[in-house]
Amino acid sequence: LEGCRNALRRARADPAIAPDEPVPLTVRPYDVTPGDVSRDVKYVYRHALTTVAEAKKDLARRLRTAEEALFLVMSGRALEDRKTLMECGVCAGYVVYLKTDTKKLAEMQDRDETFEAFE
């Protein structure tokens, strides 16, 4: 059984490509209905060089939201900021989910309003 799993993993993995090769990825909001692709975001990253933190920063800028409130999720687990997407097992054409921590986002907005009140 483990041999079959390893063979499937090898078949799904990207072929040997350069570390800075552009790789397409689909980012889907975490709260969408299954099968709904209308809110998908196409994202291209550099294969072995882009970290999860860099991807979150780019996506936050695109979506005009706070980077600290975003989480990238694949296979039910949040991806670590310090790792590259390749180290997390993300390959070309994969779908990665984008989860927004609404509580953290609200706290950040409240804090910004408080700072503006003091200015």
Image: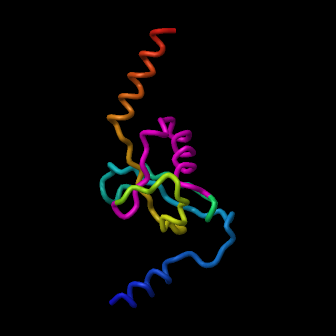
Q: Count of labels shown?
A: 0
Colour option used: rainbow
Question: As rendered, which of 30 and 16 lies closer to the eye?
Answer: 16
Q: Position of residue 14 (x, y in %)?
A: 56, 75
Q: Which residues are magenta?
A: 50-76
Residue 116 visible to an observer of this rendering: yes
Q: Quadrant of the N terminus?
A: bottom left
22 left or right, relative to 59: right
Residue 80 location, x and y as percent?
Answer: 46, 55
Q: Quadrant of residue 9?
A: bottom left
| Residue 41 counted in the magenta span | no
Residue that appears at 65% across and 62% down: 22
Q: Residue at x 56, y 55 (%)?
A: 51
The residue depicted at 31 percent of the width and 58 percent of the height is: 34
State whether residue 110 is above or below residue 116: below
Q: Where's residue 115, x and y in %?
A: 47, 16
Q: 58 above or below 90?
A: above
**Left or right: 39 in relation to 52:** left
Camera-side residue of 100 and 80: 80
Within the magenta stretch, is there residue 70?
yes
